[in-house]
Image: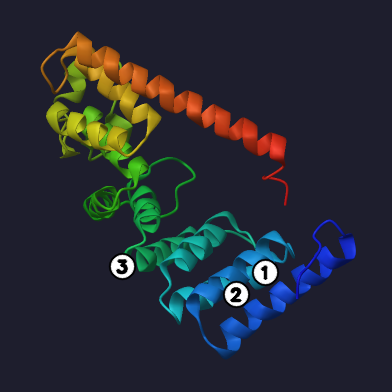
């Protein structure tokens, strides 16, 4: 049946039929891709986050669908579709998604395991978190590469409370889980830039300018600065287009 999407009633009918098709494909045909679409439908169209969470969780755990692990992990982390957040469950789900080769799930698992601060409730495990971040970067998640670069820029102290960014002499005497390594920092920043991360490109430009982790090269510094500026402009243009077209209004 052809729908005239300029007519409100036909739009409503189309949306309802879409939901029916997704439910059939998920519950009857047990197609994980369609189950994920059903979760997206319940989230974006119906605004029923509780049911969406149930679908994403089942699709992750029962059908081993990595994208749904990422979605449900985010729900658990921020408390969407439930009474409160559960970072520990979120970590478990992100780890599951990472095992299923979803690079963003690897990123989130790595961030949870390496983060510090008063509101962090997940037990810190830097070596394990590093491995998740490395897998994420290797699978073309630019943010993971950028984050790894930052870890090598400053190092990761065993006791973060002892680290003082304004006292490099004292910091040099600390016990580090990951020691500062500017060459590694540069390589990860370069990889992040190649994958389109604007701040990674900015760091590459700065490191070329200073000669940190790479031979000083002002021409390359300028080139990567221009790449960073181009990426930033493109991002701002995309945001403007989305706003004008109403794509963020669900």
Q: Which mark is residue 50?
A: 1
Q: Is residue 125 left or right of residue 87?
A: left
Q: Quadrant of the N terminus?
A: bottom right
Q: Dot 1 surroundings within 10 Å: few (below 14), some, or many (20 or more)?
A: some
Q: Is residue 123 visible?
A: no
User: Contact (CB < 8 A) between labels 3 and 1?
Assistant: no
Depicted 10 relative to depicted 158: above or below: below
The residue located at (50%, 73%) in the rendering is: 33
Query: How far across and how far down the image is residue 129, in percent?
Result: 28, 52
Q: Nearer the viewer, residue 86 or 151?
A: 151
Q: Dot 2 surroundings within 10 Å: few (below 14), some, or many (20 or more)?
A: some
Q: Tell which residue pokes out farthest to the front in this image.
A: 2
Q: Is residue 110 left or right of residue 80?
A: left
Instruction: First in sequence, mark 3 or 1: give its number.
Output: 1
Q: Which mark is residue 99?
A: 3
* Residue 224: quarter of image: top left
Q: Which mark is residue 54?
A: 2
The residue located at (24%, 28%) in the rendering is: 154
Query: How far across and how far down the image is residue 250, in percent?
Result: 72, 52
* Residue 54: quarter of image: bottom right
Measured in 3D between alpha carbons, the distance from the residue under mark 1 to the one under mark 2, in whole angstroms, is 6 Å
Where disc 2 sits, the SS reads helix
Depicted 55 relative to depicted 173: above or below: below
User: Contact (CB < 8 A) between labels 1 and 2?
Assistant: yes
Q: Dot 3 surroundings within 10 Å: few (below 14), some, or many (20 or more)?
A: some
Q: Nearer the viewer, residue 2 or 44?
A: 2
Measured in 3D between alpha carbons, the distance from the residue under mark 3 to the one under mark 2, in whole angstroms, is 21 Å
The residue located at (68%, 59%) in the rendering is: 44
Q: Is residue 25 left or right of residue 174?
A: right
């Amino acid at each position: 049946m052809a729908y005239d999407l300029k007519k409100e009633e036909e739009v409503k009918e189309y949306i309802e039929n879409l939901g029916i098709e997704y439910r059939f494909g998920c519950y009857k045909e047990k197609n994980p891709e369609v189950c994920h679409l059903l979760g997206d439908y319940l989230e974006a169209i119906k605004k029923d986050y509780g049911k969406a969470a149930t679908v994403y969780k089942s699709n992750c755990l029962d059908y081993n669908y990595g994208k749904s692990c990422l979605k449900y992990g985010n729900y658990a982390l921020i408390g969407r579709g439930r009474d409160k957040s559960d970072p520990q469950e979120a970590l478990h789900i992100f780890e599951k998604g990472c095992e299923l080769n979803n690079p963003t799930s690897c990123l989130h698992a790595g961030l949870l395991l390496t983060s510090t601060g008063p509101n962090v409730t997940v037990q810190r495990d830097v070596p394990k978190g590093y491995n998740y971040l490395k897998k994420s970067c290797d699978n073309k998640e630019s943010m993971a590469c950028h984050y790894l670069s930052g870890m090598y820029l400053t190092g990761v102290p065993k006791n973060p409370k002892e680290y003082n960014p304004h006292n490099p002499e004292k910091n040099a005497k600390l016990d580090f889980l990951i020691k500062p390594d500017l060459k590694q920092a540069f390589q990860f920043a370069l990889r992040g830039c190649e994958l389109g991360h604007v701040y990674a490109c900015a760091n590459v430009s700065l490191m070329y300018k200073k000669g940190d982790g790479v031979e000083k090269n002002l021409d390359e510094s300028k080139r990567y600065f221009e790449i960073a500026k181009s990426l930033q402009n493109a991002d701002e243009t995309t945001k403007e287009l989305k706003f004008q077209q109403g794509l963020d209004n669900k």
